[in-house]
Image (cartoon, rainbow, N blue to C red):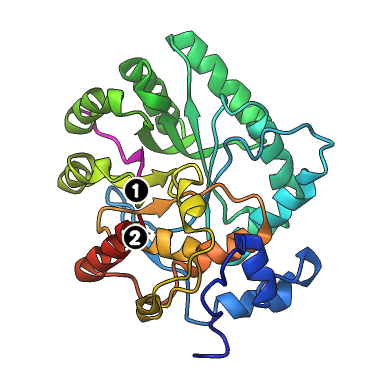
Amino acid sequence: MSPLTPPAAPIGLTRSDFLRQTGTLAGVALLGPVLPALAATGPVLKRSIPSSGEMIPVIGSGTAVIFDVEAQHARVPQLAESMRTLIAGGGAMIDTAPTYGQAEKRLGEVLKMLEPPIRERAFIATKISITGEQAGIDQVTRSFADLGVARFDLLQVHNVRDTDTHLKTIRRLRDEGKVRYTGITTSFERTHPEFERIMRTEKIDFIQIDYALDNRLAEQRILPLAQERGLAVIINLPFGRNRLFAKAKGRELPDFAKEIDCASWAQFFLKFLLGHPAVTVIIPGTDRPEYALDNLAAARGRIPDAVMRKRMLDYWESLG
């Protein structure tokens, strides 16, 4: 085993315990020395946004729940350090929404806390999450103010709600130079028929869908259609609302994980998703710097091919 490759997680350890005991977590103050331990296998993988050819890092972060805190909450500096670590380490996309409580306001404050060279590398994605044209316009106006930016890299219709109306608003903003890319999102199976209709009939750049090792419904129709239509794909809920960690707790990684440069369960889960050719970016919620490092490591080294993905799935299902 390479001295830069942590061993498989011992029985009973949480993700944080494992990182701490293997020396890859030394606390926020020591993140500089920590980074090489998880970045030794090369640069973070980037993939192309089909509509433009722009290359984007395949690991980003979501903000639901974790950024919904008060301005004076003790977690805010940790969130800022998590985003600094993510972007400095090679990530870019940070996805949020006005319906995530106070997440947009906190993210706006966090962005101001980052050094300009790092802040400028962030790819900011948000959403319209309401019904009605004027209500959508008003919501976007608040999002600009809360996030403290003059342009969104990506503006999405959230959970295909009043999509035809909001796509008109998003395209107008794009024409005005206030939005770079357009998209739609869902995390609900009941919306898939409408989601597919929009994918087939509208000219958009991105879709966002839930997909995880134990939630592979998107593989059946959504991901193949995205490839057919030339759409970038953002994956949310890659850890299945932490179901995957709950099942993995106390279990060791399989020996073959080293064949894809995989050193943690988080990397195992993320690499499985990155092995699907339709996937462009994955946005796990990232509220600790050590999680940012761990997630980024999934985008370094070897990515599983179809044969390895089958092996990973078979092993996972054998765990019962």
User: Can you say whether 275 is above or below 181 in the image?
Assistant: below
Q: Is residue 14 magenta?
A: no
Q: Which residues are magenta?
A: 202-211
Residue most extreme to the bottom: 2
Q: Nearer the viewer, residue 18 or 290?
A: 18
Q: Are marks 1 and 2 in contact (CB under 8 Å)?
A: yes
Which sits earlier in the primary sequence, circle 1 or circle 2? 1
The amino acid sitting under disc 1 is Asp
Kindly identify which numbered label has been placed on residue 214. 1
Tell me where residue 33 sits by quadrant.
Answer: bottom right
In this picture, residue 260 sits left or right of residue 192: right
Q: Nearer the viewer, mark 1 or mark 2?
A: 2
Label 2, secondary structure: give it.
Answer: helix
Give the residue type at disc 2.
Trp
**In this figure, which residue is indicated by the disc labeled 2?**
316
What is the x, y in percent for residue 245?
Answer: 50, 53
Question: Helix, strand or loop at disc 1?
Answer: loop
Relative vertical location of residue 281 with respect to residue 25 in this rendering, above or below: above
> Would you say residue 208 sits in the magenta stretch?
yes
Q: How far apart are the two marked residues, 1 and 2, measured between alpha carbons? A: 9 Å
Q: Residue at x 25, y 28 (%)?
A: 192
- Residue 22 as seen in the image, left or right of residue 197: right
- The local crowd at label 2, few if under 14, some if 14 to 19, many if 20 or more residues have their Cα within 10 Å, is some
